Image (cartoon, rainbow, N blue to C red):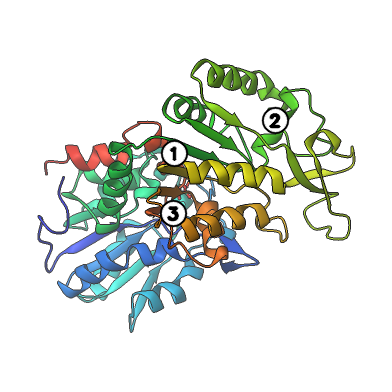
């Protein structure tokens, strides 16, 4: 696979894929890891006097122009992170305007293109537009590992027409996740949280075969609890997945996997109500309450398993971590990892957008062996699926 060390890019027009799909809280970037992640590659390209045109998506505008999803808001942060005097922004993907902009931008300067998902061609991989765009450039660099599981124009289309090179962040993500998976140490524990089972069925089925303990938290645990006839009040549940939740638990038994579900929880009427918070056994959730975090006994149970492990994988917060105090369980687990993992030689790999944000709010990641900034792509990789983006880079022989 071509990378920025084995393939020299100098005085070229570079089409650079980043993933600036960053989390926002009240309109502000709550985690800029994905912007910082591409700094090294872009600075290398600037130093080597290339014209760098950055392409990214933001949100899911479904092929339509929608101001809400404009990437313009990234510009000040991007300019600061890259330490640029000037950053251009191009609002359209029109081939002629790209050509004009390329003439205007000097070698060693950077231009950000508007959200690529404003064009229906991104997800449809319209080869005409792919060709129109790529003909203005000399080389394509993909530094968006976190978007590499998408079979989209800017991931798999551009490499059909240009020499395609993996950026430093792309290589770092792939190497670190592989290093962890290839050096499996037992006993091992996977902690999986987040809102929905539906996005993690295949992952859970895989993990059960590979891990001694799989602990489930977050709203996705509610569906498992309900499948065991535990009443969860107004909690978020995926009723149509009750059978799937049962199948997963049966499979865990078959594989002798210690499948941990919350035994106690923190509840309230909703995630904003702070004066009606109750800690209770999972069997005593009031009908008008929703489960918003794991309780003390559960977090202790999960932490005990982590301390017994030599390898830990974590994806997804254990509660509604965006709303204090429902971040407590997740923060407690992060603090435990920070305090003990390195000393006790426990290897910890974490990944996923919300996972990253919760580590940030805990204030330190010093106990973690590696924290990936990829969400869906990280999960696909763990499932053992080689992403289309990786394949496109590997197979590129232009
Ligand atoms: C992510 O946030 O996981 C990536 O940016 C991919 O976004 P998507 O799920 O909207 O394709």
Residue 341 numbered mark, or none: 3
**Gap between marks 2 and 3 measured at Cα:** 31 Å
The reply to whether discs 1 and 2 touch (Cβ–Cβ < 8 Å) is no
**Gap between marks 1 and 2 measured at Cα:** 20 Å
Pointer 2 residue: 223
Residue sitting farthest toward the bottom: 85
Query: Which of disc 1 and disc 3 is earlier in sequence?
Result: 3
Q: Is residue 360 above or below residue 260?
A: below
Q: What element does badge 2 sit on?
A: helix
x and y, in percent, of residue 345 in the image: 37, 51
What residue is drawn where x is 33% and y is 80%?
84
Residue 379 numbered mark, or none: 1
Q: Nearer the viewer, residue 134 or 380?
A: 380
What residue is drawn where x is 28% and y is 44%?
179
Q: Nearer the viewer, residue 184 or 394?
A: 184
Q: In the image, is the residue at mark 3 within 8 Å of ligand 1 by its beta carbon?
A: no
x and y, in percent, of residue 356 in the image: 50, 56
């Amino acid at each position: 696979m071509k990378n920025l060390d084995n393939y020299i890019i100098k005085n070229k027009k570079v089409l650079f894929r980043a993933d600036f799909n960053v989390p926002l809280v009240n309109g502000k970037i709550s985690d800029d890891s994905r912007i910082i992640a591409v700094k090294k590659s872009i600075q290398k390209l600037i130093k080597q006097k290339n014209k760098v045109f950055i392409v990214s998506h933001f949100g899911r505008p479904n092929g339509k122009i929608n101001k809400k999803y404009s990437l313009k808001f990234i510009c000040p942060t991007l300019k600061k992170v890259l330490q640029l005097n000037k950053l251009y922004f191009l609002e359209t993907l029109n081939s002629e305007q790209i050509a004009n902009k390329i003439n205007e931008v000097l070698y060693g300067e950077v231009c950000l293109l508007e959200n690529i998902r404003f064009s229906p061609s991104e997800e449809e991989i319209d080869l005409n537009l792919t060709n129109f765009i790529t003909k203005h450039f000399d080389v394509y660099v993909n530094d968006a590992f976190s978007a590499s599981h998408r079979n989209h124009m800017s991931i798999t289309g551009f490499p059909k027409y240009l020499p395609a090179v993996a950026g430093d962040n792309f290589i770092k993500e792939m190497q670190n996740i592989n290093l962890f998976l290839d050096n499996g140490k037992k006993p091992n524990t996977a902690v999986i949280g987040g809102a929905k089972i539906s996005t993690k069925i295949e992952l859970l089925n895989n993990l059960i075969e590979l891990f001694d303990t799989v602990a489930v938290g977050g709203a996705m645990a509610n569906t498992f609890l309900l499948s065991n006839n535990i009443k969860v009040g107004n909690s978020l549940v995926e009723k149509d997945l009750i059978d799937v939740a049962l199948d997963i638990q049966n499979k865990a038994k078959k594989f002798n996997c210690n499948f941990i579900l919350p035994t106690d929880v923190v509840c309230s009427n909703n995630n904003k109500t702070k004066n009606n918070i109750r800690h209770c056994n999972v069997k005593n959730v009031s009908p008008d309450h929703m489960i918003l975090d794991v309780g003390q006994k559960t977090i202790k149970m999960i932490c005990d398993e982590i301390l017994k492990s030599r390898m830990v994988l974590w994806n997804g917060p254990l509660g509604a971590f965006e709303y204090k105090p429902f971040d407590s369980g997740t923060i407690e687990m992060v603090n435990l990892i920070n305090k003990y993992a390195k000393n006790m030689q426990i290897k910890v790999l974490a990944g996923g957008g919300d996972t990253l944000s919760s580590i940030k709010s805990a204030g330190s990641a010093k106990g973690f062996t590696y924290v990936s900034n990829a969400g869906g792509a990280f999960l696909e990789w763990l499932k053992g699926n080689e992403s289309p983006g990786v394949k496109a880079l590997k197979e590129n022989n232009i």
